[in-house]
Image: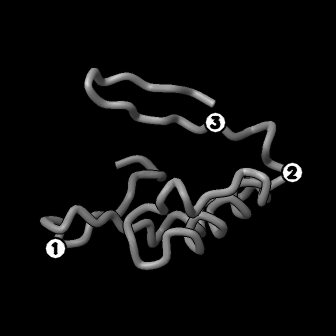
Amino acid sequence: MTSFDPVLPRESASGRVEYTRLPDQLHHPNLVQLFHHWQTMRGTRPMPRRADFDPASLPLLLGNLILVDVLRDPLRFRYR
């Protein structure tokens, strides 16, 4: 396991991934800010919904963010 692998809980059948060790391993202020923002957006869900995320809420990180839309039928990806 690498230092950034998520910690999978025993009840992984639910599909939930826990990132309990990750905050202590982030040292760059931008990553720490993004991580805490992500945690706030997702609440109790494994991931935030797209509607929860407003890129303009992180103005100092905008130049470092990429949004990927997953489109189905046929499967394709749109990068923004």
Q: Mark 2 vs mark 1: which is more N-terminal?
A: 1
Q: For the C terminus, give its image quadrant.
A: top right
| Most foreground residue, 12 or 66 | 66
Label 3 neighbour load within 10 Å: few <14, some 14-19, many 20+: few
Q: Residue furthest right?
A: 60
Q: How many marks?
A: 3
At mark 1, the secondary structure is: loop
| Most foreground residue, 25 or 11 | 11
Instruction: Give coordinates of residue 43: x percent, y percent.
Output: 49, 77
Q: Which one is in front in this view, the residue at disc 2 or the one at disc 1?
A: 2
Q: Can you tell which mark lies on residue 60?
A: 2
56 lies left or right of 38 = right
Q: Is residue 7 above or below residue 72?
A: below
Query: Circle 1 is placed at which residue position?
Result: 11
Q: Is residue 26 above or below residue 1?
A: below
Residue at image location 68% in from the left, 59% down from the top: 34
Q: Mark 3 vs mark 1: which is more N-terminal?
A: 1
Residue at image location 72% in from the left, 58% down from the top: 27
Residue at image location 73% in from the left, 63% down from the top: 33
Q: Residue furthest left?
A: 13
Query: Circle 3 is placed at which residue position?
Result: 66
Label 3–label 2 contact, CB within 8 A: no
